[in-house]
Amino acid sequence: MTQDQWGQLKQDLLKTIGKSNYKSWIEPLELSHVEEGVATFAVPTSFVGNYVSQKYGDQILYHARSISPDIRRVHFQVPANSAGRPTARASSPRPAADAKAPAQRDASMPAAPLDKRFSFDTFVVGKPNELAHAAAKRVASGGPVTFNPLFLYGGVGLGKTHLMHAIAWELSQRQPELNVVYLSAEQFMYRFVSALRERKMMDFKSMFRSVDVLMVDDVQFIAGKDSTQEEFFHTFNALVDGGKQIIISADRAPGEIENLEERIKSRLQCGLVVDLHPTNYELRLGILQSKVEYYRTQYPGLVLADGVLEFLAMRITKNVRVLEGALTRLFAFASLVGHEITMELTQDCLADVLRSSERQVTIEEIQRQVSDHYNIRLSDLIGPKRVRIFARPRQVAMYLAKQMTSRSLPEIGRRFGGRDHTTVMHGVRRIDELRVADVQIAEDIDLLRRTLEA
């Protein structure tokens, strides 16, 4: 049987067993050789080989004999050189070989593609993420399970997905025989629903419970989906009981995910729960500096003026993806127009990003922060009492509201117990005067402003 004949045989099987089963079980098979009446097929894992042999072996043999009558038996084996392959299956085309990206290993696994950029080498470590990085490195070392699951949580663009991809890459290099599956909670749910609809739940269970390391991104997505939560719970238990490692990410801590079953919350909290904190200035600057080294190779000859990176690290504070995207745009724009990357060019090129990244402080935030700073109750800050212990902090809060928000004086007055706009104007003017004469007031204003802008 030739490779062309095997290709035709696969098309015949596609018509017989359906597209879903074909993609999961037949498509990954490769005809290795035919010798002494035995057709040998290469399979990505022994699990796939056993399953295909049991469920589709007779059909494959039947079709093979129709092409080559001398074939008496079919055999499925993992190639000896498969140890060089990683175990996290990519559902998209394979990256170029020079990118050192993994080939597809277990086609039965409905995994998501791994991004070759997301490795430990490209992850910039700082105080806000050092614990998460250390925990991810420990899991990626492939040693005995010390905490299970590892639960990473934090806001958008703080590095959760980067660390999960890095773990998968590291494991694929250290222990290529492991079956590592990375996917989003949405993909898990989609596979589950498809299995229910096609009455293939046993296939689904076999897929997910045969993995060595399961990585589920954005688990908050399954909250409120009762049937998916039920299957996730049982899959989780089966893997943990079997000593398999689980890594989960979400946008908040397990106990804060609404509509997530209590038993799942309890399970998720049994391991190590790590918060990726918002980036600080030093970490953002480090990320930019690491990116600049790469862009210098892509845009040779471009000159970057002093202070630009520091400016971006100070202004774009919430989202690392936005920060990196801003730098990408800046280098591309400067290259196109042939100009040095100056502060003026930066402000012109990134005007929209800088506007959207400005910290939008609310009057309520200011009131809470001032109340905490002066150790008074919020009700006294906005209440009618005029004693100095409340009146001065109230004026400070009004001053900050005028300086840090776009609210009008009448609006600010309404937020401070329905006061007239002239009262607000007087308070703002008074604090302006005291900032010059009273060092303590000046220090309080500066500290409060920096805290609110953080």
Image (spheres, rainbow, N blue to C red):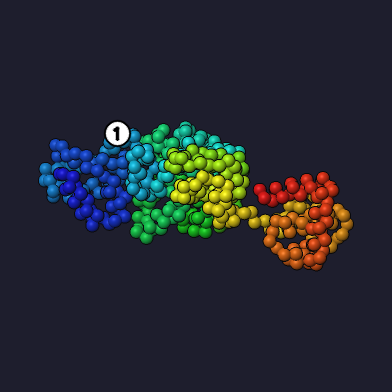
Residue 39, horizontal then vertical, whole percent = 18, 41
Left or right: where 159 falls relative to 432:
left
- The foreground one among 351 and 81 is 351
- Residue pictured at 20% horizontal, 54% vertical: 12
Residue 249 visible to the viewer: no
- The foreground one among 393 and 285 is 285
Under mark 1, the amino acid is Asn
Q: Look at the image and tell me in which quarter the N terminus lies.
A: top left
Left or right: where 351 falls relative to 245:
right
- Residue pictured at 82% horizontal, 63% vertical: 423
Secondary structure found at label 1? helix
Left or right: where 233 falls relative to 282:
left
Residue 102 sits in quarter: top left
Q: Which residue is mark 1?
A: 81
- Residue pictured at 45% horizontal, 50% vertical: 336
Residue 313, horizontal then vertical, whole percent = 59, 45
Left or right: where 280 falls relative to 449:
left
